[in-house]
Image (cartoon, rainbow, N blue to C red):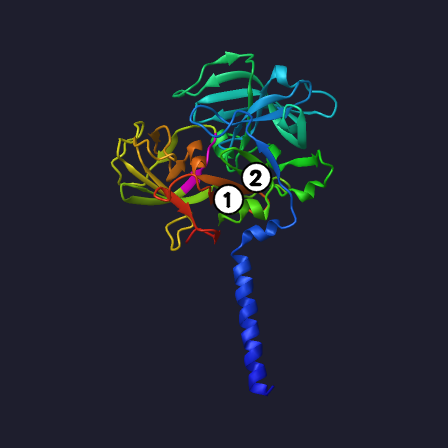
Amino acid sequence: MSRPLRILAAAILTFMLSALAGVRAQEPWRAYEGLDAIEIPFANGPISMSHVPQIWLSLNGSRPRLFGMDTGSTGIVVSAEHFIPGPGDVAQGPGRLVYNSSGRVLTGEHWMTDVVIRRDAHTPVATARVQVLRVTEITCLEHARDCRPESDPRNVGFMGIGFDRGSAQHTADNTSPKNPFVSLVSLASGRPVSSVRQGYVVTRTGVHLGMTPALTRHMAFVKLTSKAHPPGVPDWNGAPMTVSVDGVTGRGTMLMDTGIDYMFLSPPAGTALHRGRRAPEGTRIELFMPDRQRPQPAFYEFRAGRRGNPLHPERVEVVHDANVFVNTGRMFLEGFDYLYDAAGGHVGYGWNGRVSHEYGGVTPGSYGPRE
């Protein structure tokens, strides 16, 4: 081969390798090759307007019991009869946790303890070491939507697995690990904890601890910005999105919240919506994750009050936060699978094929918010 042909062949090879590297960079699911994921079906059935999804857990001094699984908060709250501190548990002083959606304020004592995560009442799958709040009292914010004060409450069991919730819950200064799904210390299978990546995939029917290529190839991955946190306590800033309300558009953050069946919307300036009221019937709401692009990474839309769209929340409550914000509620999962990769700092959206593309869709790949 002549020298010019050798140079041309080398250039072609370099270009092909570069293109291949670019393709692989657009396939973040490859980071999960060789890893495991643990499937846990919701104990009370698929996502529904009528109930918060539930997962079996067991804490020291109590039989396994069902806990509501909430992506809109972070941390476990449990009443005294379902957690009796014992050897190995560490007292960490008084604490409280605020649920802004309901207006409930739970106070009690913080404990560092082991939490056993279960597939069902009889089958443990993993153990996490996290801080829990042993609740002794429930009080209410001034304008609480759904709250009844209680002293020495019973039958409390709620598990928050969300991120970037410290400011909203008034726990920003508390850096102890609280999310059991990203704080695993052992697996019931005997496999090393490192075989399951810190994070999870939530679907309409259950949750998977960890990620695999099979679970995530169909997803649009959105990079999150880093939040300062101590080593070993992963946390990231909220997921970027763009919302359009009857054509008025603004950029902000979104929260996929399995804890509620309705939507909170802090709209961009210039809409006709009023704080403290529901969005009127016919209001067109479009969400773009992370923003409007071509191709569009992930998006969906609905009209308030029009029930034919499975992604429609029960209602849209209008608020006015300092920034544009959307809490989607759990009906989001009628059309999407949802990923949180705590180790890599990504959220992911996968179209599950149950809803018509008339209402939304996903272009798999890797994306970031535009500056």
Q: Quadrant of residue 89?
A: top right
Residue 87 sits in which quadrant? top right
Dot 1 alpha-carbon crowd within 10 angstroms: few under 14, some 14 to 19, many 20 or more = many
Q: Residue 241: image x %, image y %? A: 41, 44
Q: Is residue 97 shown left or right of residue 302?
A: right
Q: Looking at this rendering, what residue extends furthest in the top direction? A: 151
| Dot 2 alpha-carbon crowd within 10 angstroms: few under 14, some 14 to 19, many 20 or more | many
**In this rendering, is residue 94 above or below 208?**
above
Looking at the image, which residue is at 30% across and 33% down? 304
**Location of residue 133 in the rendering, given as x and y in whole percent from the top left corner:** 59, 23
- The residue segment tinted magenta is 253-258
Q: Is residue 325 located in the magenta-colored stretch of the structure?
A: no
Residue 119 image offset from top left, x and y in percent: 62, 29
Residue 188, x across and y down, in percent: 71, 33
Q: Secondary structure at mark 1?
A: strand
Q: CA distance from mark 1 to mark 2?
A: 10 Å
- Front residue (pair 223, 285): 285
Which residue matches tag 1? 347
> As drawn, is 236 to the left or to the right of 335?
right
**Given the image, on which type of amino acid does mark 1 rest?**
Val
The residue lying toward the viewer, choosing from 321 and 56, is: 56
Q: Is residue 149 visible?
A: yes
Q: Secondary structure at mark 2?
A: strand
Q: Earlier in the sequence, mark 1 or mark 2?
A: 2
Outermost bottom residue? 2
The residue indicated by pointer 2 is 200
